[in-house]
Amino acid sequence: MPQLEASPAIDFHSETYKDAYSRINAIVIEGEQEANDNYIKLAELLPDHKDELIGLSKMELRHMKGFQACGRNLQVTPDMEFARKFFAGLHRNFQEAAAQGRTVTCLLIQSLIIECFAIAAYNIYIPVADDFARKITEGVVKDEYSHLNFGEKWLKAHFEESKAELEQANRQNLPLVWRMLNEVEADAKILGMEKDALVEDFMIAYGEALSNIGFSPRELMRLSAYGLASV
Ligand code: PL3
Ligand code: FE2
Ligand code: FE2
């Protein structure tokens, strides 16, 4: 008999799955927690947008709680220490930029890079998630588009004066994303997520964002592939 399924069913309760989930689940919990902190910091940097940014920060906290519930539902304990190390590079760069008032860099790190990373990861996770986590993730990913949109709108409105800092921030931070993808590749595969698909979806989301902000096709090719040779 030919097999009808394209891929074998995933056993969400196997030790292998739960072990990989303890790290991936921690990554998304930590990512949502840091996103919450980052939007609070952005609200200080952009007082004109304070209420909107505080609103976004609260959404991130809800996302975090949703993903904590996903881990509990599978009886997995998230490895938060692993996750903090995973985000350390982007975290440090965001903190340093915030301390120096480099708002454009903060927006690029949180609202473009991290949100596009989340959008790619969540969209690829949804079809291979357990039923409980799928419903949570579907709700979350809708919000992430609105967070990306905040960054795009602001940067588009300040494009000319932000351009040089955006290029510099992209050069500093995009290579970290490729490294993070390499670090998560093996665990993501156990969850049914392919690295090539993650890279592709990230590039599409990030390239679209750069284009919406005002970069030319030639510029965005150069920007979005920066550091990709190391993948
Ligand atoms: C900001 O709103 C969210 C920040 C979260 C970043 C998540 C990055 C995820 C990369 C890990 C790939 C596996 C995803 C699995 C989805 C549950
Ligand atoms: Fe989020
Ligand atoms: Fe977000």
Image (cartoon, helix red, strand yellow):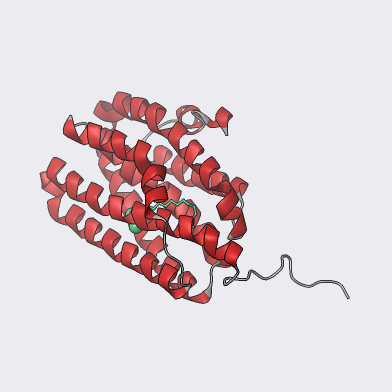
Which residue does the image show at 72% across and 65% down from the upper left?
A: 7
* Residue 184 x/y as whole percent: 52, 47
Quarter of the render that holds ligand 1:
bottom left
Please give left or right for residue 44 compared with residue 211 in the image: left
Taking the view exactly as shown, the residue that stands out farthest to the right is: 1
In the rendered image, the vertical position of residue 43 relative to residue 230, given as above or below: below
Please give left or right for residue 7 compared with residue 166 in the image: right
Give residue 87's quadrant in the image: top left
* Residue 156 x/y as whole percent: 30, 39
Taking the view exactly as shown, the residue that stands out farthest to the left is: 47
Q: Is residue 51 visible?
A: yes
In the rendered image, the vertical position of residue 67 relative to residue 98, given as above or below: below
Which residue does the image show at 48% across and 72% down from the upper left?
A: 74
Which residue does the image show at 31% across and 27% down from the upper left?
A: 163
Which residue does the image show at 28% across and 40% down from the upper left?
A: 107
Q: Say which of 72 and 137 sits in front.
A: 72
Q: Say which of 17 and 162 sits in front.
A: 17
| Quadrant of the frame with the C terminus | top right
Q: Is residue 155 visible?
A: no
| Quadrant of the frame with the N terminus | bottom right
Please give left or right for residue 148 compared with residue 12 in the image: left
Q: Say which of 16 and 168 sits in front.
A: 16
Please give left or right for residue 31 compared with residue 216 in the image: left
* Residue 212 x/y as whole percent: 39, 41
In the rendered image, the vertical position of residue 199 relative to residue 158, given as above or below: below
Figure label count = 0
* Residue 39 x/y as whole percent: 23, 50
